[in-house]
Amino acid sequence: MSPTTAARYVGQSVKRLEDPRLVTGHGRYVDDVVLAGMLHVAFARSDLARGTITHLDTSAAAALDGVRAVFVASDLNPQVDSLRASMFPPHAPAPPPNLLADKDVRFVGDPYVMVVAESRYIAEDAIELLDVEFEPLEPVVDYETAADASALVHPELETNLPNQMQVPNPEQTEAFAGAAQVITETWYQHRQTNVPMETRGIVASWQPHAGVMEVWASTQSPHELQLMGARTLGIGEHKMVVHFGDVGGAFGQKVFLGREDRAVLVAAKLLGRPLKWIEDRRENLLAANHARIEQMTVSIAVDEDGKFLAANLDQLQDDGAYPLGGPAGLGAMSTTLFPGPYRMGPVSWQARTVHTNTCGRGAYRGPWQMESVAREQMIDRVASEIGIDPLELRRRNVLKPEDLPYQTSTGLSFETTISPDQTLDQAAEIIGYEDFRVEQAKARERGRYLGLGIALYIEPTSMGMGPLGTESAMLRVEVDGHINLFMGTGSHGQSLETTMAQLVADELGVCPEDVSLHQGHGSGYGFGTGGSRSAVIAGGAARAAASGMREKVIAIAAHLLEASAGDLEVTDGVISVKGTPSAQVTMAQVAATAYQNSDALPEGMEAGLEFTARFKTPPVTHSNACHICTCEVDPGTGKVTLLRYVVSEDCGNMINPMVVHGQVAGGVAQGIGGALYEHAVYDENGNPLASTFLDYLVPTAAEVPEIEHGNVVVPSDTPGGHKGTGEGGAIGAPPAVFNAVADALAPFGVYPNRQPLDPNAVLSLIASGAK
Amino acid sequence: MAEAVAISVKVNGRLQQGLVEPRLTLADFLREKALCTGVHLGCEHGVCGTCTILLDGQAVRSCLMFAVQANQAEVTTVEGLALNEDTLHPVQQAFSDCHGLQCGFCTPGFVISVAAFLEANPDPTDEEIRHGISGNLCRCTGYQGIVAATRQAAATMGGKSR
Ligand code: FES
Ligand code: FES
């Protein structure tokens, strides 16, 4: 067998290959794509949450100089039969496949007319010229009462409650009956949104007669786009060419094709001219997707020692009008994942999803993370009810090595390679738990309110069901010895050009700089980048392709050097005989032989250096982490200042620690934003009140503290021992921050149960309490 | 429609002339006419800072200005900072060294803002850095690498001028 070389790049904080172009402004994002004859798209959007279109005359808009087309629902909608993406069950109840609102509008931001013009300026001018009248209808805004509302968001579905699951567990009822105490609380998460700094966007160019649709898009799933786009247009995937360039963030928002994206595809084909649509920020905040918007009522039974005996969960989630990508209905996932890193005992649960006349729900970094939010906040509540320190309560219930492997009553199986107890201890040690409690007590005597919050969780990463199960890597050593790697991923900040090159470099014995990653057109099917899946699944594919390639390179080199394969080593693209470095050939010589002098290859060997591998991942690979942060609350202003923030993470072997820490920090900042500042709020009539960055408050460098990292490394059983980690920061941060603020407010005798804990919320909590 | 206006702007040392509509934003002028696509648009309402450029040496938000207002001015975009293909500006180098970017969409605005900030505050404390860059939004990094990069750039640039 071929020899292996020691890891030189994997595990190192290798500087990113992406950076030189990006720091100099030479990235290629979708809005940078300019095609000859390209026209620009703008959408007219509803200002009403619910209403009937009683009159629509587009003639003045169409007559404006520079306007090329004005499309209404009847022009575009008949072209599509489903908006559903691969991931969702084909028969789940879904909203009607309306690209444009037809006859009635169903949320503020619902697109009802598409204008195509020579410039975006003109397209927007034309929207002003639309002659349109609406008859307002009573909207369904409050998701808590939506199921019983007489108005229907989608009359086609005949209900506002399309999704409801109930899994009672008699053992839970029994445990509750015998428990020392059962504690109940309802936890609320509010409406937030992903806010990638680059909004959504697409450029579509139809080639008549060739029958080819060529697309440039801001996407995290180029193959999903290829597949969904082809289905939308009724063409074969071989005629759908998706170019993948730089993508300015997504966090779940760019997995699926939106209604607008599909409308652009259909219109580009109808017009036979390249079209560009770049979402503006207002559209992004109002109509791309919203997230979180849910509540979970949790009851936990405990014995005298604080041991968890059983739990009962009731989850309700708001899908809005048109969930992005299909019927989201992730409530069941939150309840299933609820036991997390603890021996929770038997769990009964119910999960319901409703439609409202608001922006559709979509995936946002850890889309099911209500499980950690509700559980970790609940554990602090239990701790305070029964008078046990929250760290101690977690220690008494956390899964320990001797419990593993572990099966939860909700059907999750945890591997022996998780380490929640270790991350809990490590984070507590880094923050200096005992010392902080002393400092906190002293501060309270001086009238200062400090708090500490813990969140411990297990992150299901690299899930392997259905379309998520595999990724492919096509690796080609070119004639000059450099390497092109084609993968189905969609890196949008995750640094895959670097990390995949690191994996290939070590496996093949070359430098990362010698490897170029190509995503999108030309690569093999993959679900793309999301779900914390790239390190394990894409990494598995890259590794497998490189290792297959290595076998062949070594075989050719052995033949050329008249040496035995076992005696060869590969370093920096040079294959040499161990101990006799003068006997060597370069990767370029091997490649030139493979392609251009194939008669010199070993007898019977296939010419060329091309190898494709498809990695099939295990059903799930769990990582785990513990967040502990401290804060000070100013009771005069309600302002929360985060003092320290510690994350202890076990994501197995890290390919690039710098990248891992970057992912963690980014997620934490989003979680901080969610817990304290960001709120995509609606008034009672369904009018969105946060349509600019002046109202939707994304945290700045002044709000996010320094993040201190600890790492526990228990390798997973997947190749390389990696585990996913991309979503974790946004899972752990909201409950950690929430718990810290709640702890700081404890002297006032108040118990917050909803976010965001902005100054107003904090002040009214303090006012409601008796000090 | 309003009459087009002839303007002439020096962009990264090169004269860019053109007939523009009075309502054309400076950002769109730079992206579409001067082909400086490193000028990014994250909000078009003056909050996110991704469109930041130097106008006669001052950091400004090009989405909030009209191109006609930049007539006769000198503009530097992120493309104009690197000394040559092989040598990055110390701020750009520091962003790469310190993992100050992930998706890179906010980066041009940050690089320009940080360069201007360090020009005015060559030796900032961490708190001054955090405050100084709080006019720019990044959704990917949690600002850790950006703060570190600003620190590093301050050290390299200060070292040079001292
Ligand atoms: S695009 Fe100019 S500040 Fe956001
Ligand atoms: S690096 Fe993506 S927004 Fe800053």
Image (spheres, rainbow, N blue to C red):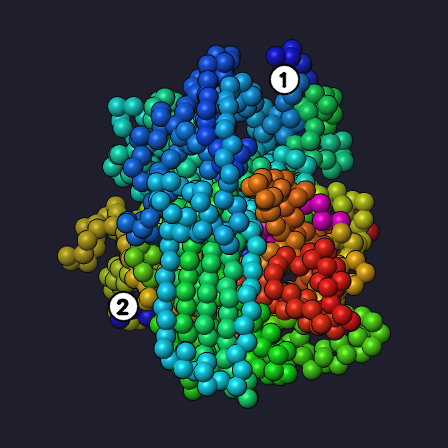
Quadrant that contains the C terminus of chain A = bottom right
Q: Residue at x 41, y 78 (%)?
A: A173
- The foreground one among A387 and A216 is A387
Q: Residue at x 37, y 65 (%)?
A: A166
Q: How many marks?
A: 2
Judged from this view, the residue extending furthest toward the front is A150
**Image disc number at residue B20:** 1
User: If the image is split into quadrants, where does the N terminus of chain A sit?
Assistant: bottom left
Q: Which residue is mark 2?
A: A565
Q: How crowded is the residue under tag 2: few (<14 C-alpha within 10 Å), some, or many (20+)?
A: many
Dot 2 falls on which chain? A
Expressed as whole percent of the image width and height from the top left, the position of residue A622 reads: 42, 69
Extreme residue toward the right, this view: A446
Q: Are marks 1 and 2 on the same chain?
A: no
Task: Point out residue B29 in the picture as x, y percentages from the top left corner.
Answer: 62, 25
Examine the image and state in which quarter residue A219 appears.
Answer: top left
